[in-house]
Amino acid sequence: MTFEIRAFYGSEALSAIIQLRYDVLRKPLGLSMEQSQFPGDELSTTVHMVGYKNNKMAACLTILLSDVKLPEEPQSGQLRGMAVADGYRGLGFGALLLDAAHEWARQKGVSLWCNARRKAVGFYSKHGWEVTSPEYEVVNVGPHFRMCWKPKQTTQTY
């Protein structure tokens, strides 16, 4: 079977997404399940992209439309909670999911930003993201960098 990506809006599939975030991102740090849910998760404008392998949730990420304005960008979205389940890492599923998020953002005319853990900066950089801040500490989580990604404008010549 192939890796299938589905997009959910608002609260659809949210409990399973929160569980995956908790298992991958919060539980290893001794944080609670409640810290795996983000303000705005349930909004109809929030997109949750989920990757499935053999109908099992293998990866997820969330894009929340944001009040943060990036220079020269009309709309931005915060990418949060990107997680790939144990047993599925190193297979390229995170890259496929991030590519799907980029395509969603291109179609919507949205630039993306995130607070990337230090160990994830290389991954995002390989996919066209740029570091836009000095390193800073997120309490109980560790060192992070602000990063952003902007859709490339294509110019056609005739």
Image: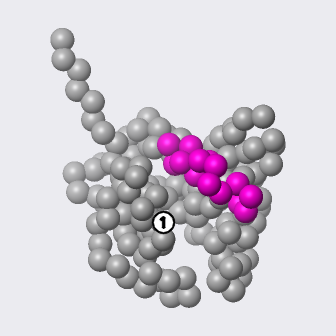
Q: Residue 147, image x and y in percent?
A: 36, 63
- The residue at the far left in this view is 158
Residue at figure coordinates x 44%, y 73% from the top left? 118
Q: Is there any visible trace of residue 11 in the rendered image?
A: no
Residue at figure coordinates x 50%, y 83% from the top left? 142
- SS for dot 1: helix
Query: Which residue is the site of mark 1?
Result: 120
Q: Is residue 14 left or right of residue 73?
A: right
Identify whether 71 is placed above or below 115.
above
Out of 157 and 122, give the one closest to the viewer: 122
Residue 31 in the magenta stretch? The answer is no
User: Could you say which quadrant of the image residue 71 lies in?
Assistant: bottom left
Q: Residue 137, image x and y in percent?
A: 43, 85
Out of 100 and 86, give the one closest to the viewer: 86
Q: Residue 63, image x and y in percent?
A: 52, 55
Q: Is residue 3 left or right of residue 122?
A: right
- The residue at the far right in this view is 55
* Amino acid type, label 1: Ala
Residue at figure coordinates x 59%, y 47% from the top left? 92
Please tell me how crowded label 1 is: few (under 14), some (14-19), or many (20+) other residues with Cα within 10 Å: few
Q: Is there any visible trace of residue 81 in the rendered image?
A: yes
Magenta range is: 85-99
Out of 119 and 8, give the one closest to the viewer: 119
Q: Residue 34, image x and y in percent?
A: 70, 77
Residue at figure coordinates x 72%, y 35% from the top left? 2
Q: Is residue 23 left or right of residue 25?
A: right
